[in-house]
Every structure is written in structure tokens, then in C-alpha cells.
Image (cartoon, rainbow, N blue to C red):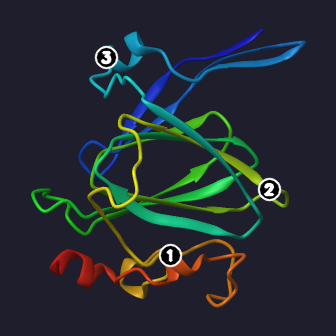
Amino acid sequence: MTLVPFSVEHTEIPGLAVLRMKQITDERGTVREFFRQSAMTEAGLHPGPWQQLNVTETRPGAIRGLHGEAMTKLVAIVSGAGFGAYVDTRADSPARGKVVTVDLTVGTQVLVPAGVCNGFQVTSPTPAQYLYCFDREWVPGMSGTAVHPLDPALGIAWPVDIDPSDRSLLSAKDAAQPTLAEALAS
């Protein structure tokens, strides 16, 4: 039996944390502890409650995001692999405009504070499933911000090249988002 303990890595964006799930592997496979309120509380992290959970299945190379709604998110790849990008657009943050990227594998989670844009690209050769836990229910038109994921000013080195006009890789909604400079100016 192999035990991987729960761990937390804080990033350069205040409140954005990369978590490694507690997991136990034996001859049968692996059990991952997706969420334990006491572990989050002991680590000084947002303990929930989570009011909505969504799972996306996304094709290889596709990008979703960058979206920073007025809600805290706990996100993770549950199948496949991805590359996460996070941009701080909060007006009162000392890290405003800062970008953090994370390789997303099964067993890795990211706690994303409200106002920090969240996005990812699938890097596995098969579709990836991405789980979002929200501390508020999503509603159309809710407050928040978004940034065009291919804005060169972000400096994000997306691992898989994409054709920005291919809607199977970048949605029309994400392609129409403002640049970082425009988002920060509004």
C-alpha cells in the first residue's frame, strides 16, 4: 500500500493554491480523497460549502477559459491531463495581472479565489474530464471578468498549438473576450 498525503503549495497569486489530494494505492487501484473539510480548514483554505459541481469533457488541445466569476472554485482533472492557467484580475490584489500556470494531472487540484480567472487546455491524447466545484451557483450574467486566453501579454505558453478560428478548440465566447489590459482597465 502507498499513501500520498494531502499537501498544499501556495502560489504567487494570493489565495490561489495547488493541492495534492490524499491518495491510497493498493493492488486494487487508488482512492483519492477529493475533498475533506477538516483538511481544508486546518490548511487555512476555503472549506466550502460547494453549492454546484460541474464536469466538462473536453477534446485534446481545446482551451476553456479564462473566466473569473465572483465565486471560489475548487477544480481538478479527474481523467486525462491538462495545463491550467490562472490570472489575477482582482482590483485590490497586490498580484493584479499576475499569471500562474500548473500542470494538471489526476490527483492535483487548484483552489481558485473569486476574481481570479481560471482556464485550461487538454494535453492528453484523449478527452479530459475537468471537475469544477463552486461556492455559489452559476447564473448567466453573474459578476466577474474574463480574459482572452491567447492574449500575448499574458505570456502563457499553451502546450498545444491551436488555430484560434477553430471553434472546436476555442469557443466564440472565449475568442471574443478582452485582452488583459482591457480587462484590467474596466
User: Around disc 2, counting alpha carbons within 10 Å, would you say few (fewer than 14), some (14 to 19), or many (20 or more)?
Assistant: some
Q: Is residue 21 above or below residue 174?
A: above
Q: Which mark is residue 41?
A: 3
User: Around disc 3, counting alpha carbons within 10 Å, would you say few (fewer than 14), some (14 to 19), or many (20 or more)?
Assistant: few
Task: Tell me which amino acid carries mark 1.
Answer: Asp
User: Of label 2 and label 1, which has the lower sequence position?
Assistant: 2
User: Of label 3 and label 2, which has the lower sequence position?
Assistant: 3
Mark in front: 2 vs 1: 1
Kindly identify the residue that appears in the image at 41 percent across and 47 percent down: 138
Q: Mark 2 sits on what residue?
A: 127
The spot of residue 126 in percent (x, y) is: 84, 57
Q: CA distance from mark 3 to mark 1?
A: 34 Å
The spot of residue 74 in percent (x, y) is: 45, 37
Kindly identify the residue that appears in the image at 39 percent across and 50 percent down: 139
Foreground of the two, 11 or 48: 48
Task: Tell me which amino acid carries mark 3.
Answer: Thr
**Residue lying farthest to the front in this orientation:** 140
Task: Tell me which amino acid carries mark 2.
Answer: Pro
Whether residue 57 sits left or right of residue 180 in the image: it is right
Image quadrant of residue 184?
bottom left
The spot of residue 151 in percent (x, y) is: 42, 84
Image quadrant of residue 168?
bottom right
Q: Mark 1 sits on what residue?
A: 174
Kindly identify the residue that appears in the image at 31 percent across and 27 percent down: 45
Q: Is residue 172 above or below residue 135?
A: below
**Residue lying farthest to the right in this orientation:** 27
Whether residue 68 sits left or right of residue 84 in the image: it is left
Residues marked 3 and 1 touching at CB (< 8 Å): no
Q: Is residue 32 above or below residue 16?
A: above
Mark in front: 3 vs 1: 1
Q: CA distance from mark 2 to mark 1?
A: 19 Å
